[in-house]
Image (cartoon, rainbow, N blue to C red):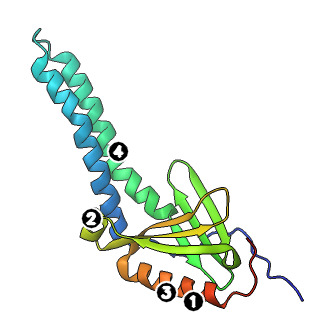
Amino acid sequence: MTADVVRLRPPMYRVSPRALWYWTAKAAVLWVVLLIPQVIWWFADSDGSTLPHLVVGMLWTVLAAVHLLVMPQWRYRVHRWEATDTAVYTQTGWLSQERRIAPISRVQTVDSERGPIEQLFRLANVTVTTASAAGPIKIDGLAARDADQLVADLTARVGRTTGDAT
């Protein structure tokens, strides 16, 4: 009897293109929250000097624009996933990137989650939990239909697996 060899490799599938808009919207909320202290500072400043406000405002605008334009595109190019008969593969990140693999025989649970913002974008997240100390594998930004299909497929594959590697 030979054991299937599972190797770490780049996964095949990208997340939904709608994830680009989702990541952009989440980042925009962050930048709006970061704008609030700047606006308060502007109105609370009584010395009348506008130069510090202009410098901070320009810096804020440049950083926000770069983040909102670059981050979603970069994440979309990096984020990938794949589920085979033997393993679940993921690749995530943008500044710090991570590849993970979970053999099907080690999968304990498969969950799907749709938060309110994900529902607006018709997206879902799938979490594959194993006994790994590294924690669960998350696949974020899937089209809701793809997430439902992935959960069903993984559940069936795990149910057909004999033995337990955990």
Query: How many numbered badges does the structure rendering display?
Result: 4
Q: Which residue matches tag 2?
A: 116
Q: Which sits earlier in the primary sequence, circle 4 or circle 3?
A: 4
Q: Which residue matches tag 1?
A: 156
- Residue 116 falls left or right of residue 43: right
Label 3 element class: helix
Q: Which residue matches tag 3?
A: 152
Q: Which sits earlier in the primary sequence, circle 4 or circle 2?
A: 4
Q: What amino acid type should be assigned to the residue bearing mark 4?
A: Val
- Residue 116 falls left or right of residue 74: left
Pick the front one: 115 or 93: 115
Whole-angstrom CA distance, mark 4 to mark 1, is: 43 Å
Quarter that holds the N terminus: bottom right
Tell me if residue 38 comes above or below residue 165 in the rendering. Answer: above
> Does the CB distance between marks 3 and 1 fall below 8 Å?
yes
Whole-angstrom CA distance, mark 4 to mark 3, is: 38 Å
- Name the quadrant containing residue 25: bottom left
Which numbered disc, 4 or 1, marks the residue closer to the eye? Answer: 1
Q: Which sits earlier in the primary sequence, circle 1 or circle 2?
A: 2
Q: What amino acid type should be assigned to the residue bearing mark 2?
A: Pro
Q: Which residue matches tag 4?
A: 66
Q: Where is residue 138 in the image (x, y as percent from the top left)?
A: 51, 65
> Does the CB distance between marks 3 and 2 fall below 8 Å?
no
> Does the CB distance between marks 4 and 3 fall below 8 Å?
no
Q: What amino acid type should be assigned to the residue bearing mark 1?
A: Ala
